[in-house]
Image (tube, helix red, strand yellow):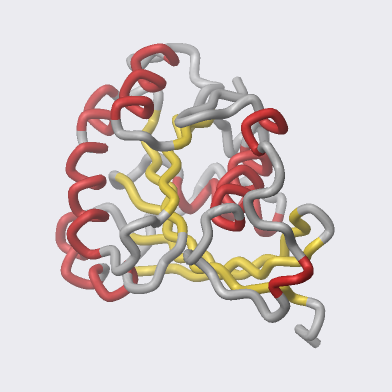
Amino acid sequence: MDDDILTTLKILIIGESGVGKSSLLLRFTEDNFDPEQTLTIGVDFKTKKLNVEGNTVKLAIWDTAGQERFRTLTPSYYRDAQGAILVFDVGSQATFAKLETWLNELETYSTKNNIVKMIIGNKIDVDHREVSREQAMAFARRHQTLYIEASAKTKHGVQAAFEELVHKIIQTPGLWESYDAGNIHVGTKDHTARSGCAAYCSLA
């Protein structure tokens, strides 16, 4: 039964092919990691319940393919999304450079102008980085997005990333509808103090 659910949120995971979007989703929803994870064909979808300050929120998470040939399939999935996670591989400067394109696409197709955006620098377990934490945080600050570093392989930062995104969505008035607004006090807590995050954050 879903009677205890405060609201259902639609979350998108976007980014270049091979950056680990599906691995992040699998780690978050099933606490599993598959080193042989195949590339997403079109769109994948999973749900998970998350407790946010004593309230249960249901997440409907859409994992979109990064390959160009599937791009025409995705615009409709941007509709009504309250949150978007943009993923790049810290070991690949090329995937980081494409974040600008993904942000533009999000701006084009999103139907909510206050959608909460988070950039995740994934694969921080790699031996060699091409994108520094400072470089990524500066980009996130410039685009006023949250920023967290993570590894789907080691679990580092994955749970925290989704929790941070949901907290931010819940504290954005008008972005979601609750069954009983009296159950949660939107905007009455200093979220920055809780997480140490402002326009960006890094949990690495």
162 vs 118, left or right, is right
Query: In the orientation shown, which residue stands out farthest toward the front?
Result: 188
Residue beneath the point at 42% across and 59% down: 12
Residue beneath the point at 71% across and 43% down: 189
Kindly indicate the quadrant of the structure image that contains residue 140: top left
Residue beneath the point at 23% across and 69% down: 75
Q: Nearer the viewer, residue 203 or 124?
A: 203
Residue 122 image point, x, y percent: 47, 32
Q: Quadrant of the C terminus?
A: top right
* Picture layout, residue 32 above or below residue 96: below
Kindly indicate the quadrant of the structure image that contains residue 2: bottom right
Q: Is residue 61 visible?
A: yes
Kindly indicate the quadrant of the structure image that contains residue 1: bottom right
Q: Nearer the viewer, residue 27 or 98?
A: 98
Residue 129 image point, x, y percent: 40, 14
Residue beneath the point at 48% across and 61% down: 11
- Labels in figure, total: 0
101 vs 45, left or right, is left
Q: Nearer the viewer, residue 44 or 37?
A: 44
Residue 123 image point, x, y percent: 49, 29
Q: Is residue 46 visible?
A: no
Q: Nearer the viewer, residue 189 or 168?
A: 189
* Picture layout, residue 198 above or below residue 47: above
56 vs 38, left or right, is right
Residue 142 image point, x, y percent: 30, 26
